[in-house]
Image (cartoon, rainbow, N blue to C red):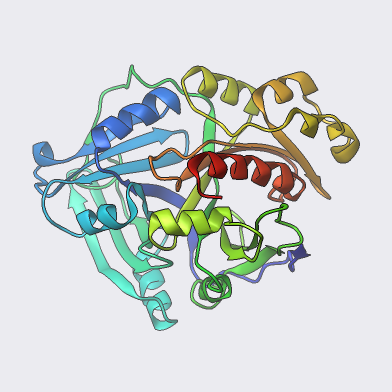
Amino acid sequence: MQVENQELKQDILPLRAVSHVEIYSGNAKQSAYYYRQAFGFSFVGYLGPETGVRDRVSYVLQQDKVRFILTTPLEEDGIIPFLSKHGDGVRDIALETSDAEYCFKTTVERGAVPVREPEILEDEHGKVKIASVATYGDTIHTFVENIDYTGPFLPGFSAMPEDTLARPVGLKHIDHIVGNVDWNQMDKWVDFYLDVFGFSRFVTFDDNDISTEYSALHSTVVSNHSKWIKFPINEPAKGLKKSQIEEYITFNNGAGVQHVAIETDDIISTISKMREQGVEFLDIPESYYDDLLDRVGPIDEDLEPLKKLNILVDRDDKGYMLQIFTKPVEDRPTLFIEIIQRKGAESFGKGNFKALFVSIEREQERRGNL
């Protein structure tokens, strides 16, 4: 592991946070039901034929500051090729900004491929300016600038009544979003975020840090100055068998978003509720907990609930963190969700990599893909 300079240079882009994550889905209505019932998101906004949009439907789901948009095509357009190639998955990591046009022009001048020219969206609730550029695979970044908007999400979306179906679990905000890229592509995309977005390297892991008996990977985390936007980028490394990144690339037909990490203030309560509501998580060997406190030192939580729920713990020089990973949330073994609670720690669970990836390999073996 190589810890990069933590004094990040000043941002060149006025980015504030992740605005939302848009997931293209073969059936957004049914997917929305799953995220409401299992993850506790509330249905807060809708766009479709009933709102005058003929080519797609979109469901806006929100829990505190976490916002997912589920979109399904109704006509032949760019969404259908995405779904045919990748299956359900993340299309857009949208970024909140104070100046969408500046972000677009600056990133395009520095080498980004334009996807959507800056434009103002407007309805009776006000205006929002948006623009988009491409990143790895078929993923894009949309810059979202709220000019004076007071509606539920973006112009054109109808507000929904209070969601009595949703069962919130305590999710607070997006901590980081991880991208998987193909062999020898990590440095290219790390440089993209450094050179085009003005981000800095946060930390780098090599195959000595992230490996098991059978497989390995490389990972570098890039971040903006405030650290509210953090993107780990993974690539495969040579091992005896197929790594989880290779499996992802195979089933996703290329690079894409591997997982979204969401923070909570009480991971024991959050995971207890999510398990009760049907979310499936990776199983961790009981032996992981035998010397946990010797490895990470004293923690506030009782060990037994962590062991029962399969929650992992790791420590860095600023504190400790607790984390857990769902099994894939799509039919293809691609996208999954991480739940994380930070108690000072700014790291990504290096001490848990071994146990985590052994667990992932067991799932790969069950699928016949190891």
Q: What is the quadrant of residue 352 in the picture? A: top right
Which residue sits at x=71%, y=55%? Answer: 211
The one nearer the camera, 349 or 50, is 349
Which residue sits at x=31%, y=34%? Answer: 31
Give the number of marks.
0
Which residue sits at x=46%, y=23%? Answer: 168
In this rendering, is residue 311 above or below 119?
above
* Residue 218 spot, x, y in % from top left: 64, 64
- Name the side, left or right, on which 327 lies relative to 320: left
- Whether residue 285 is visible, yes or no, is yes
- Name the side, left or right, on which 252 lies relative to 263: left
Q: Residue furthest right?
A: 294
* Residue 226 spot, x, y in % from top left: 61, 58
- Name the side, left or right, on which 95 lies relative to 191: left
* Residue 315 spot, x, y in % from top left: 80, 44
The one nearer the camera, 123 or 279, is 279
Which residue sits at x=85%, y=29%? Answer: 290
- Whether residue 224 is visible, yes or no, is no
- Name the side, left or right, on which 112 lies relative to 16: left
Q: What is the quadrant of residue 167 in the picture? A: top left
* Residue 132 spot, x, y in % from top left: 33, 65
